[in-house]
Structures are given as C-alpha cells and as structure tokens.
Image: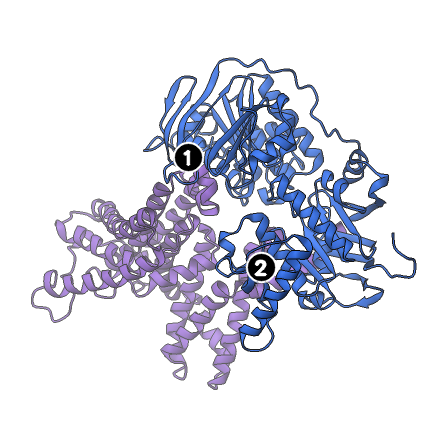
Amino acid sequence: MQDDNIPPAIELRGICKSFGSVRANQNISMSVESGTIHGIVGENGAGKSTLMSILYGFYRADRGDIFINGQMAQIRDSRAAIDAGIGMVHQHFMLVDDFTVLENVVLGAEDGLLLKRSLLKARTLLTRLADEYEMSVDPDAKINDLSVGQQQRVEILKALYRQAEILILDEPTGVLTPSEARHLFRILKGLRDEAKTIILITHKLKEIMEVTDTVSVMRQGQMTATVKTADTNPDELAQLMVGRKVLLRVKDKAPVKAGQVVLEAKNLSMTDGRRLKNVSFSVRQGEILGVAGVAGNGQTELLEVIGGMSEGSGTIRLNGREIELSGGHANARQRRKQGIAHVPEDRRRRALVMDFCAWENMVLGYHGDDLYNFNALFMNNSAIRSDSQKRMKAFDVRPLLPESTGRNFSGGNQQKIVLAREFSRSPKLLIVGQPTRGVDIGAIEFIHQHIIDLRNAGAAILLVSVELEEILSLSDRVIIMFDGQIIGERVTSDTDENELGLLMAGIEGRRE
Amino acid sequence: MSTRIPKWADVVLIPILSLFLAFALSALVVLWIGENPLDALVIIMRGSIGSAYAWGYTLYYATNFIFTGLAVAVAFHAKMFNIGGEGQATLGGLGAALVCLAFGWPHWLSAFPAILIGAAIFGAAWAAIPAYLQARRGSHIVITTIMFNFMAFALLVYLLVHVMKAPNSMAAETRTFPPGTHLPTAHEMLAWFGIAFPKSPPLNVSFLVGLASCLAVWVLIWRTRLGYSIRAFGHSETAAIYAGISPFWVIMISMLISGGLAGLMAVNTVAGEAERLLIDSVQGAGFVGIAVALIGRSHPFGVLLAAFLFGILYQGGVELEFEMPAVSREMIVVIQALVILFTGALDNMVRIPLERFFAQIRRPVG
C-alpha cells in the first residue's frame, strides 16, 4: 500500500510489560503502515489495552522500543505521546460534561493566558474539519446535550486539534447504534485518505472486516498474527484469537414451542417515570424475548424493576399472579421466591460481591434458603461450600477454588459463577442482561448454550443485550427500546440487523 | 488491594511494620527532648507488663478499648464509619448508672446482667438516631455521630449538674452506687481460686465480658446470616440490593450493635471502677476505639491485640510521665497519635512498597 522507503508510522520492537506475575505483553513487535487503518483484535485480557497504554504513555514498557515514523521515541507520559503526534479516543470519553464542544477541544491545549484566541483558532479549525470529514457538531453545544455518537466525534476532533497524525480508537462502537458506527467508519476512512494512520481496537470481527486494511491478533499477551484484512475471514480470526476452532453461531436451536404466558407486563414504568415509560410485553414458556437497544434507553431500568431492585408502577403478572412493584414486598428476595432468576448487566457491582469468596457469592440472594442455614440465625457454611463446589464444577468454573475471591476470577469465570447460581434452580423466569459483556469468546459459546438449554427446558427468558448479533442468534422475538419505551416488536426470523438498527436509532419501522 | 499480597502479610506484617515505624519516629521524638529512647521503652514495658500490678492496669484500659474497638469494627463491616463511640459510651455510662441507682441491688450477680443491658440499650439508642438519619435521609453518619458526641457530653453535664448530682457534694457526680452493684475485681475473683493479685488495679469482671464479646462478634460476622448480610452490604451496596438485603435494616442493626458495644465500655469504668457516674467516665476511649479497629483490621481478634497494645501505651505512658519528667503528658499523646497515624492513616505507605516487594519475588511464576 505504501512505498518501501516511507517508514512505518509506528513500529514496536520487543515490547514487554508485566504486572506482578501477569505478563500482559510478551515480546510484542508490530508495525503499522502510515496511512492505513490497522485493527487490533483479541479477547479481554489479551493485552490490547496494555499495549495501547504503553503507546500512549500511561504505562512504560519493561523492555522494548517504540519508533514513530522511523525515529526512536521515548514516550514517558501522554504529553510526550501527543507531541509525537499520537491521539487517543478512549472507550469512556474524557470530556467535561458542562463545557461546550469548543471548550473541551481547547482544554489542555490553550495558548497563552487568555482563552479567547485559542477558542477563535479552535472554531476555525473545527469548521474546516467538519467540512472535510462530515464531522459536524455545534461548537457551542454543551457535551451534556450531545448524543453519544457526537461526543465521540468531539473526542476525535480533540485529537485532530492537537495535530494527531496517528489516532488510536479503543472499542469505539461499543456505545453506538449501527448507523452511528457506519458514520464513524466513513469518518475513519476519510481520515485515512488524508494520510492519517488509525489504530482500531475492537473485539467485533465484523468491524475489522468492514473497515481495516491490516489486522493484528493478540492472545494471552502475545501477538499471534498480523494479516492483510483482505486475505482473511472472521472464522480464521476467531480461531487465532482463541487458539482453537470456535462456533460463531448457536447450534441446536430447536424451533420455539412456546407455552403459556409466564411474564406479562402492562404499562410498566419506573417510579420516576422518566427512564422507563409505559412498557407492555409478555414472555411465554420456552421463549426468549430479546430486548434490543442502544445502551441507556431504559433496558437497565426494565431489569431493575422486574428484578425488584427499583420500585415501579403498572402491573407485572407472573403465571397470572400479580407481583408487587412497590412497598415492603418489592425486593429482590421476594422475586427470587416467586421464581425469577436474574443475571444482572453489571457483574462487578451487582451480580457479585467482588471481595467475597466464590462460595459466598454462590449463595448471594439465596443465602436465606433452608439448605444453607442451621436455623434463623446461623448459616451452615460447610453445606454452602460443598454445594458451591458442585455448582462450580457443573458450570466448569476455573479455577475450581471455592475459597478464591470473586475478583481473582476472569470475567468469563465470574459470569459462570453467576450463571451457576441463577440457572441451576430451574427458574420460571430468567431475566438476563448483557450475558457476555467482558467475557472471552470461548465462554460466550458456553453461556449461549446454557441460555438455550434453559429455554428448551421450559423457562421464559428476557434477554437484554446491546450486541445485535447476540439478540438475533438467541431470541425468538425481539422488542426494541428507545428512550424508555418499546418502539417496535419483531419476530427474529422476519427481521435483520438493518431494520433493528433503524429502530434502535428511534426511527420507527415502515412495515407496521 | 488485598489480592496482591499474601493474607498473612496483610494481616500481620503490615500492622507490625507500621508499629515499628511509629515507634522509630517516637524514639526520635524522645531523643530530641534529650532522653534515651531505650530507657523510655524499658520504663513503658516495665510499667505496663512488668508486674501483676502493671498488668492489672493495662488490662483494665485494654477492656475499654476492646469494647470501643469492637464497636467501630462491627459498624465498619457495614461500611459505616461510627465516630460516635465516645458519645455512645457516655450514654452507656448513664444507662449503667441509672440501673445501679434504681434499686438496692442485693448481689452483683443480679445487678450485673441488668447493668450490661442498661448500658448496651442506652449506647444503642444513642447510635440509633444517626443510623436512622443515614438509612432514611442519607445524612452522613460521620457528621451525625460526631455531633452526637457533643450532644451526649452536654446532656451528661446537664444531668450531673442539675438532676443526678449527689446531695451535699461539690463535684458533678452521682452518689456512690449501692454495695450490691459492686463488680468483683481481679483481686477478688482470683482470690476465689486462692491466687494472690494486688488490690488496687481496677481490672474487674468486665474484662471477661470483653473477651466474650470478641468471640460473639466473630461468630456474628462470620457465622450468622446477619453477618453475611452486613458484610455483603459493606463490600457492595449494589450487590446487597440485588441479593434482596435491605440497606435500611443492615445500617440500623449494625449501628445498634455497634452502639451497644460502645455502651458496654462504660460498664468497666462506671460500674467496675468509679462506682458512681463521673463527668469524664469515657476518657477518650471512644476515639481510641477507631485506632484499635483500624490496627485490628476490624477483626475481633485483631481488635483484642490492638486493645492490649493501647492498654500498654496508656499504662506505660502514665509510668513514663512519672519516671521521666521531661516527657510530658502531651508527649505521650504525641506517641499515641503517631501509632494511630502510621497504623491507620498511613497504611498505604507500608502497603505499596510491600506489594512491590511481593510482586518482585513472585515474578517467576507466570
């Protein structure tokens, strides 16, 4: 793609970085051609973020050298990275919400004591950039008032304002609707055509195939391959990431034989009436109802109200019996007694007590069950231990150490602990949020299979996920949430990603 | 984070290193005022554990700190920082005094349970108001318990000056409790077994209650359903709500237990030693309890050891003041403050280098 005598934009040679006994990066060498989009894929914990943090000056490598445009560079801190022409768009935006776009762009890069000149300069540059790359944002809008996609553009503009020639984007599409993601890719391609170099970190193989020129794969701290995107395919990449063959599709999904209605929600709202508004739907026995939507459109609140963690109004019936949504009986304990199991979206804050041992976590929420207690006061810890050991074994939690604390397990194994706790009590209704968030590909297969098995065993399942692929491959029906409301319902087999994408963006379907 | 270093180092090594640093700095202070720190150390140790007499005082002080330390520790397991031990103990003293003065108790065996219950209930009640304000209104427990310390003291002064003052007395104190409320001292109890023990140290039966409380708190935290709920809430409120644990009840119950334990502390000083209610029966033990719980890592047996350590510092400090006039009362407080500073506030100063050290020696594993 480039002349041989143009040095690579970035060249890493033998980068090593350890945290204690964890070797996050082992002897990594990589070269990124100038004027290309270079993807880096790998599972969680493969070392992608560590590598980029070294490049951006957050960490210093234990060993190894960095060359920028053929020159050896010492990147001690992010200031040095910016000076070397590297810009970073973080997964979680680093913006001041109460500042305007212009103020955010200038922040930290002001010239002189008075702001006015910097702001003026930024304004002209912003208009120019907006024209060039169709990145229009109102320079005087407050960040608060912008959509997530627009906020991300501000992050990119910030980097460009600091004259970045190399742009690193860390999981940029995690919070975007499919159409916003496509817009982002158009912007990135435009930047590439202007000879900027872009590094895209993602775990979504589809994006890699769609937008990158070259892709590097990381596994367990090592760079396992760098290939031209045109010469590879998602299956091969997945295999390189995991180290074995992976099924990207769910197998054995027998056609739905839905039974009677298990969960019926009518005009369900959260008590504050803003984040969840008058939602009505039902889930049948042996059916998975997918809830699609961009993060933050009421899905979290829906799970919390059904799970008994927040008060709500409206009605919910479970097998025809009404459930209290407010007052003394509206809590998670009552819901469990009624047969609702809940795998929350936020594993680290909700589903597990990270400082508890695995065996203590294994009874969280069920700690009042007779099996685990001698009497009203004392718990039977040895019964809990042996029971937990059994459940951990059944769900292949590794390492199989009930005494190990929650935070010492990997994301995938933490999730398996949660599943082992919630799935194995044959719930009537399972509500599950982002079941595979932060989970490695190997465990995703396992988790999906268990969800399907539970459905085949006759449970009603409400599945919330921001990953459209997951929704499409698991659910039998889909409802789409936007701004706290349901704006569409589809049978999975009659819809596709494009249609759902439009609905997720709040554009109502045309087929109704 | 505790995952980066072995548990034994977290529990044992860090407190010991912190203490060593505190003593090293104290030695410099002693040196600076022209005394020999080694001599000072000898005086402290001889004065606190060098004789049966010394032990009697050291354990008497330790008893106070066991109760207030446990009080802070229990609340801390629910992530409640109960700074109000001082006030709760003050009220506990009032409760104990009211029980003692209520009847002409025939024998200490009948009076003792009632005194314990009275002290615990008064302490718990004083903790209940800040707990309720925290649980229902979100008023920060640190702020409210501090304010309640002042209110407790003001209330006590008012009662001792205007309501409960002994007739014909110049001092703001109640009349002496009836003889049936006299709690057996170490001297008397050991005499039942024919063991001689000096008569003057105020060590009394409350010490045994303190030991029993340590065991009870351990059982509560690690063996009961309530303890499970308290710890779950303390580590993660969001996860506790997910588990159906009511934050309101956890805050209320843990603070009631905490206040009750703080209240029990006053049994030792009011019923055990003074045998009347004085204006300063708590003597700052409520605040020392915070340091004791910090050093003891909120574990009942850690609290026991830390309480003993502070018993040594208190009793040894008194001796030091007596034998080394250059070391003033304030100097002793400085040394105690250094211990608190190093073991409590400067925890990370020892922890972070230690984490690096363990990271180094563990490196070959990966």
**What colour scheme was applied to this rendering of the protein?**
by chain
Kind of residue indicated by mark 1: Lys
Residue that label 2 marks:
B13
x and y, in percent, of residue A413 in the image: 64, 37
- The secondary structure type at the circle numbered 1 is loop
Which quadrant of the view contains residue A138?
bottom right
The answer to whether A187 appears left or right of B272 in the picture is right
Classify A334 as above or below A106: above
Classify A63 as above or below A354: below
x and y, in percent, of residue A81 in the image: 71, 65
Q: Disc count in the image?
A: 2
Q: CA distance from mark 1 to mark 2?
A: 55 Å
Is residue A395 visible to the viewer in this orientation of the structure? no
Residue that label 1 marks:
A277
Residue at the far bottom: name it: B34
- Given residues A120 and A402, the one toward you in this image is A120
- Residue at image position (20%, 64%) is B154
The answer to whether B317 appears left or right of B345 in the picture is left
- Given residues B29 and B167, the one toward you in this image is B29
**Which circle marks residue A84 in the picture?**
none
Dot 2 falls on which chain?
B
The colour of chain B is: purple
Kind of residue indicated by mark 2: Leu
Which chain comes out blue in the rendered image?
A: A
Which quadrant of the view contains residue A41?
top right
x and y, in percent, of residue A386 in the image: 57, 29
Residue at the far right: name it: A4
x and y, in percent, of residue A142 in the image: 50, 57
